[in-house]
Structure formats: structure tokens, C-alpha cells
Image (cartoon, rainbow, N blue to C red):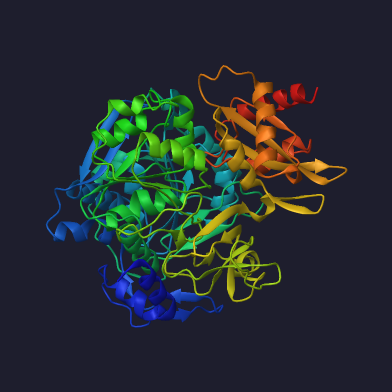
């Protein structure tokens, strides 16, 4: 069977296709009902099946004789620490922590908030919760107290598990004062607070009354066995970033998600068991859940927990060092990480220091990857760089290429083709499907594939309004897209990133592609700002590569000419501003809406997900100078 045949079967014989895929994981009770509706009429997969995610990630491999295979590699250049855990060792850590949670009175169906840094104990905690049917909500370590408060008040956890601190490059970020403040502000009381002491400094003064020491709890607890849960039992909640007011908690099931991850690891990422997979993400993002914890471990891959930055620990060769040292076969990161490396090492000199012979594929997602970055990667690395697209809501890829099959073909700037199970179409605003090469709304016919969101935690009306109401019978992604004659889809970005210039609808992503092609530019963002005459006009904010000697004004003029040449005068790009850095989330997404609001001179709220607030004042100062 080839990729296109597999896709066709997944659409024409949905239940038969996914029943066959479900056989690739071990169930305690294999589902008799493959597809059914919940009480709200929303499709659910494998409703009467029973299984356990922690068992699939650990115990199953030990039973099969692979207990001494390395399951987890922890690599922290910011602390100079490395650790490896076999599946046998992983089981001890996870089962004893699970036993500790049981001793505190937690049971299946309870919730736990996990507020921890990039350390193995975060992974242990997620798997320990899954082992006993406790629903975890991982919050990005270092988020402000209010972000913890809205999650505590929404999911009402019985326990909050945290650490003494995170480390950002060379800076220690204390967590306990943030946790104490969040608990004070929260409407709902948290019964227990468990703290893992990283022992980075003497931090006894940061502790507050009632905390439980993580290691002491593990040491005194009996190992807990895994419990059987229903396929539709929530594995975790993951709140959308930048929440204001009531948060939007994406609810993930267990059985559908396990089936989808097993499928993704084999067919999409082309991974064989025992190979090493590295998703350079954070536990707090969907990528961290799906492809740093559950996906690789289900597939018996070694997974890497990396604590550091791509260009600062200690230099722009860090990624290549990790790949070389740990014999990484396949990596997954955001395009912004590659752009950051390209900026600091434009000629790829640091790449030459490392043996990358095991490195066979690079996957990119999180935002669209520009052609200039793909070209740089191809020139200096020379392995396939596969762009793909998915969302927190889906939990696994929706667009991509099935690299398990050797005949996959990459089209640069495309996110690939629909992944089996996702019947993706491009609609106009009236719900009619568009012909090839016309831009419209990216929608997916229901039912979504297994593993996609069950809904929004305790709020089906909001789920329906947010995703299902605009095009009845379809899930609306919020993104725009173009499909070509070969079925490849080009995601043009959030629909609000299309700007209207004097009646012409223009894609900012197309302009970004041209700006990025300038030889001196490392990365950029193009946004639409308000204009009295034309309604909106494009404004480009760009970062130059390291070592550029040409003046900003000259580069800005060259970019304006380049856009006029490639797109035409209709683009109306007459504003280009060179800056040192772009504001981004900690997962690497450029905060385009924030840039647009700043340039329009409107009030804005600093997103909780921002990587470095200092960048905002840098851009504001530069813009004041630019205007004058």
C-alpha cells in the first residue's frame, strides 16, 4: 500500500482503517464500537475499549524484553548535566511516584496541575498520572501566577506538582514564589503541593507551609500498578496559550490518541522502534506531550529531554552536538530554531564539527517555514527537511508526508498532503470548495481522526461555537490555505493575517517569503497596519544575519524593491524596519498580532507565552526612531 492508497482507505472506510490501526497497540479490552457519538453528537473513537497509556509507554516494552533499552536521555547544557534512563529505570520512577499520588488520596478522574521545567521528573509525573487515571494539565514552567490561577480554577486539581526552579540560559527562575502567589489568588484550594528540589542553590527561604518533597514521597511510596481506563477517559488537558478571561482547555482522550501517535511515529515520522527521536519542544506544548513523551515511548523510541536554547548553550552548534552525541535519527523543531541557528552561523561552520551520519530526517512545524531557510538547511545539512502542520487541538499531524514510504516528494513551502483520517478541504466564505490555486479557509470534514480533541473541558457550547459552527459538518481550523493540482496544501497562516489593501486581499505570508529571500535577512514578520487611505498597508519587521555590514537603510530599500519586483506594486510594501530580535512565544512562534497592535499604537496585553518581554521596548524604541 502506498501513501495515497492509505489516505483513500482512511476516508472511504474510516472505521475499518482505524480498527486495523488500533490493533498496533495493546488494549486490555479491544473496542467493539469503533466510531460513535457522544451525548452532544460529536464523534468519538473506540468508546468501549480499555487500555492504559503508561502501560503502553513502559510496561509493554519490558514485557517484550526491552527493559534495558534507553528510554529517556536528559541533556541540559544550562546545568552541564546528562542522565539516561532505561525502561526498567523509568518504570521504577513512574510507578513509585504514582504510588505516592495514590497515598495522598488521588484516584482515577482527579486532576493534577504540573508546573515544571525541562527535567526528567516532568516526564515521570505525566506518566505517573496516566498510570493511575489522573488527568494532568502541564503548564509551561515560568508562566506568571495568573496563568496558573485560571487553570487551577478551571480544572480544580487535587495536587499541584512543581519544582524549585527552571533555568533560562544562565538565569535561575524561581518557581515557588510564583506557585505560592497563584495558590493565594486561586478560588479553589489545592489539596497538595509537591516540590522537586533541583538543588541549584540553597533555597529553603522559598518554601512555604504544607509543601511535600517530591523525592521523599517517591522514596517512601510503594510502586503502583497501572489501572485500566476507558478509551475516552481524558489523558490530559492542555490550555491554549495567552489565555485571557476563561481559558480554553483542550481535552485529549486516551485510546484514540495512543492509536494516532503509534500511527504517526511509524508512517509520518518513519521511525523504527529503538531509534532515537528528538522533539526540541517544551513539555508545556502539544508537541512536548505528543512527541517528546507519549509518541516516542509508545513506539519504543529513545526520546530526548533537552534543557537549553538552540544558539546560546554554548553556541549555535548545540543542536548538532546533541544530534551527534546521542545518535539522533530524526528531529522535530520549529522553523524559528533553524532560522536562529542560520542567523548566528550563516555559513554552517559549526555543523562541520559534528558527526551527523545517523541524522536522516528533520521535521518542522509550529509556523510556516520560508524557502530561504529550507535552502540553507539543504545546503549545509543535506537531509530531507519535512514541513508539516497540526494544532494543539489535533494532537498529531493533519498535513504532512508519510515518510515511511520511500517515494515521498517534498514541495518547498507546502505543509504536505492530508494525513490519513483528515479529509481536508479549502472553502470560500460561503462553504463552497475552491479550485486549485485559490486561497480560502482550511476546514476538515467530521469526524476528525482519532486523537483529535474530545472538546473543551466542561464547555461543549464554546467548543461548538469556536470550531464547528462556521461550516456545519466541518471543523474550522482558523487558518487560510491554498491547494494545488497535486493535492499539496500551502497554509497561509491565521485568516486574520490576510490584509485588505485598497480592496486587494493580500497574504502576509507571501510577502514574508519574499522578504526572507533577501540574502542579508535571517527572519522576518509582515503585518498589516492601519492606513487612512487604503484601510491597511503591509509593514515588514526583519532581523539580519550575523556579520552583516550593509546599513539598515540600504537593506530596507532593497527589500521594498524586491517585493515590488516579485509581487508587484499592488503589495504596497513601503515600510521595512530592521530590528535586533522579533517577539516570540517560548515555543518559537512569532507574535505577529502583538507586533501589529504595537505598530498601530494601540493598547496591548503582553502574552504570557512571550520569550523575552524586553524585546517589546526594543521594537517600540526602534519604531519611534523609524517614524522620525
Tell me if 33 is positioned left or right of 517 in this view. Answer: left
Q: Is residue 418 above or below residue 620?
A: below
Q: Nearest the camera: 115 or 67? A: 67
Q: Position of residue 273 (x, y in %)?
A: 22, 55
Q: Quadrant of the N terminus?
A: bottom left
At horizontal 60% and vertical 40% (from top left) the residue drawn is: 514
428 left or right, relative to 85 = right
All told, the count of numbered labels is 0
Q: Position of residue 403 (x, y in %)?
A: 33, 57
Q: Nearer the viewer, residue 254 or 433?
A: 433
Query: Going 36% across and 66% down the picture, which residue do you hit?
Result: 3
Residue 230 falls in image quadrant: bottom left
| Residue 34 in view | no
User: Percent from the top left, x then y, of residue 359?
Assistant: 28, 42
Residue furthest left in the image = 65
At 33% from the left and 32% from the top, the residue drawn is 320
- For this orientation, the residue located farthest to the top is 549
103 horizontally vs 136: left or right? left
Residue 214 relative to residue 232: left or right: left
Residue at figure coordinates x 46%, y 62% from the top left: 417
Furthest toward the bottom, the residue is: 32
Q: In the image, residue 505 lies at what x, y percent?
A: 73, 54
Residue furthest to the right: 533
Q: Is residue 254 above or below residue 403?
A: below
In what quadrant of the picture does the C terminus appear? top right
Q: Is residue 4 visible?
A: yes
Picture layout, residue 101 above or below residue 253: above
Amino acid at each position: 500500500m502506498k501513501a495515497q492508497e492509505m489516505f483513500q482507505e482512511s476516508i472511504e472506510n474510516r472505521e475499518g482503517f482505524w480498527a486495523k490501526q488500533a490493533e498496533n497497540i495493546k488494549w486490555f479490552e479491544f473496542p467493539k464500537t469503533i466510531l460513535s457519538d457522544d451525548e452532544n453528537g460529536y464523534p468519538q473513537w473506540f468508546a468501549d475499549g480499555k487500555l492504559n497509556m503508561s502501560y503502553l509507554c513502559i510496561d509493554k516494552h519490558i514485557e517484550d524484553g526491552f527493559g534495558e533499552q534507553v528510554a529517556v536521555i536528559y541533556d541540559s547544557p544550562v546545568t552541564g548535566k546528562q542522565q539516561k534512563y532505561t525502561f526498567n529505570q523509568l518504570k521504577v520512577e513512574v510507578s513509585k511516584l504514582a504510588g505516592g499520588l495514590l497515598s495522598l488520596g488521588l484516584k482515577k478522574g482527579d486532576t493534577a496541575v504540573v508546573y515544571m521545567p525541562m527535567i526528567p521528573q516532568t516526564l515521570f509525573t505525566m506518566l505517573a498520572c496516566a498510570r493511575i487515571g489522573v488527568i494532568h494539565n502541564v503548564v509551561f514552567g515560568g508562566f506568571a501566577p495568573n496563568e496558573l490561577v485560571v487553570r487551577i480554577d478551571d480544572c480544580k486539581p487535587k495536587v499541584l506538582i512543581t519544582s524549585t526552579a527552571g533555568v533560562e540560559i544562565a538565569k535561575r527562575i524561581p518557581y515557588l514564589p510564583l506557585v505560592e502567589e497563584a495558590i493565594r489568588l486561586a478560588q479553589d484550594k489545592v489539596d497538595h503541593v509537591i516540590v522537586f528540589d533541583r538543588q541549584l542553590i540553597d533555597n529553603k527561604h522559598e518554601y512555604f507551609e504544607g509543601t511535600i518533597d517530591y523525592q521523599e514521597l517517591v522514596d517512601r511510596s510503594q510502586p503502583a500498578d497501572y489501572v485500566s481506563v476507558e478509551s475516552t477517559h481524558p489523558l490530559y488537558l492542555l490550555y491554549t496559550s495567552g489565555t485571557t478571561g476563561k481559558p480554553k482547555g483542550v481535552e485529549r482522550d486516551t485510546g484514540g490518541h495512543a492509536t494516532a501517535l503509534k500511527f504517526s511515529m511509524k508512517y509520518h515520522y518513519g521511525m523504527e522502534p529503538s531509534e532515537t527521536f528528538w522533539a526540541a519542544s517544551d513539555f508545556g506544548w502539544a508537541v512536548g506531550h505528543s512527541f517528546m513523551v507519549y509518541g516516542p515511548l509508545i513506539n519504543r523510541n529513545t526520546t530526548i529531554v533537552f534543557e537549553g536554547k538552540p544558539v546560546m548553550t554554548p553556541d549555535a552548534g548545540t543542536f548538532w552536538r546533541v544530534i551527534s552525541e546521542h545518535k539522533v535519527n530524526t528531529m522535530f523543531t520549529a522553523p524559528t530554531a533553524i532560522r536562529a541557528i542560520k542567523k548566528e552561523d550563516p555559513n554552517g561552520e559549526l555543523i562541520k564539527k559534528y558527526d551527523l551520519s545517523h541524522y536522516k530526517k528533520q521535521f518542522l512545524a509550529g509556523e510556516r517555514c520560508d524557502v530561504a531557510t529550507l535552502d540553507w538547511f539543504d545546503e549545509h545539512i543535506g537531509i530531507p527537511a519535512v514541513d508539516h502542520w497540526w494544532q494543539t487541538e489535533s494532537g498529531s499531524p493533519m498535513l504532512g508526508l508519510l515518510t515511511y514510504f520511500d517515494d515521498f516528494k517534498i514541495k518547498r513551502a507546502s505543509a504536505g498532503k492530508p494525513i490519513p483520517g483528515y479529509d481536508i478541504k479549502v472553502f470560500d466564505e460561503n462553504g463552497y470548495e475552491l479550485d486549485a490555486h485559490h486561497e480560502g479557509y482550511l476546514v476538515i470534514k467530521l469526524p476528525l481522526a482519532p486523537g483529535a480533541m474530545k472538546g473543551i473541558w466542561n464547555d461543549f457550547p464554546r467548543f461548538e461555537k469556536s470550531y464547528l459552527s462556521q461550516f456545519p459538518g466541518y471543523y474550522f481550523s482558523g487558518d487560510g490555505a491554498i491547494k494545488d493540482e497535486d493535492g499539496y496544501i500551502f497554509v497561509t497562516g491565521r485568516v486574520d493575517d490576510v490584509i485588505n489593501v485598497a480592496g486587494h486581499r493580500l497574504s502576509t505570508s507571501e510577502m514574508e517569503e519574499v522578504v526572507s529571500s533577501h540574502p542579508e535577512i535571517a527572519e522576518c514578520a509582515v503585518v498589516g497596519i492601519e492606513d487612512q487611505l487604503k484601510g491597511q498597508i503591509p509593514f515588514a519587521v526583519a532581523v539580519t544575519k550575523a556579520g552583516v555590514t550593509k546599513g539598515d537603510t540600504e537593506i530596507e530599500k532593497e527589500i521594498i524593491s524586491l517585493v515590488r519586483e516579485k509581487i508587484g506594486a499592488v503589495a504596497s510594501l513601503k515600510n521595512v524596519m530592521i530590528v535586533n530580535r522579533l517577539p516570540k512565544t517560548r515555543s518559537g512562534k512569532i507574535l505577529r498580532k502583538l507586533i501589529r497592535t504595537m505598530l498601530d499604537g494601540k493598547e496591548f496585553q503582553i502574552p504570557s507565552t512571550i520569550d523575552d518581554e524586553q524585546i517589546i521596548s526594543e521594537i517600540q524604541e526602534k519604531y519611534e526612531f523609524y517614524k522620525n
